[in-house]
Amino acid sequence: MQISSRFTIALHIFTCAEVFKDQCKVTSDFLASSINTNPVIIRKILGQLSKAGLIKVLRGTGGIEITRSLKEITFYDVYKAVDSVEGGSLFHFHDNPSPECPVGRNIHRLLDGKLQAIQEAMEEKMRGYTIADLKNEMSVILQE
């Protein structure tokens, strides 16, 4: 089980957008150099964040603009925007447990509810962190 790196890349994008907004245009090339990845990957994630209404990608002049207050954008919003897990389910259940085995026949009954509860708890925790938290913490770090 792993959440896609698109999630942490998106959080990195928001942090750069805030830290550098008054110093330079935060473009996909700029972000790619900070994140150390290909600008094409950045543009795909920017497209997802834009589609979710979290940012605007400025054409012509370049750069990005955050569309809401940082206090209103939660980690959960970002997680959902960038499709961090396949099919919306954090846990991928192994295919075709044996119906001939008493464990295989009942494993879904044993685990499905528990795994769903774990995912819901994680998602609820994500709702408690915002992009404003990242901005505030980065401000402290930069002053050290």
Image (cartoon, rainbow, N blue to C red):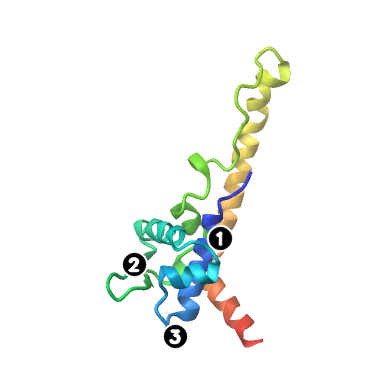
Task: Establish if 7 lies above or below 98.
Answer: below
Q: CA distance from mark 1 to mark 2?
A: 19 Å
Q: Residue 141: where, in percent of width, then height?
A: 63, 81
Badge 1 vs badge 2, beta-carbon distance below 8 Å: no
Residue at point 50%, 79% (across, down): 19
Q: Quadrant of the N terminus?
A: top right
Type of amino acid under label 3: Gln
Residue at point 43%, 80% (across, down): 21
Type of amino acid under label 2: Lys
Label located before the other in sequence (1 or 2): 1
Q: CA distance from mark 1 to mark 3?
A: 23 Å
Label located before the other in sequence (2 or 3): 3
Most distant residue in the bottom direction:
143
Q: Residue 15: where, in percent of width, then height?
A: 51, 72
Label 2 residue SS: strand
Label 1 residue SS: helix
Name the residue beneath numbered marker 1.
8
Badge 1 vs badge 3, beta-carbon distance below 8 Å: no
Task: Establish if 139 lies above or below 77.
Answer: below
Task: Establish if 123 lies above or below 95.
Answer: below
Q: CA distance from mark 2 to mark 3?
A: 18 Å
Label 3 residue SS: loop
Residue at point 62%, 87% (across, down): 143
> For residue 24, what is the image quadrant?
bottom left
Most distant residue in the front direction:
38
Type of amino acid under label 1: Thr
Q: Residue 90: where, in percent of width, then height?
A: 58, 43
Residue 102 is left or right of residue 137, and the answer is right
Residue 92 is left or right of residue 14, and the answer is right
Name the residue beneath numbered marker 3.
23
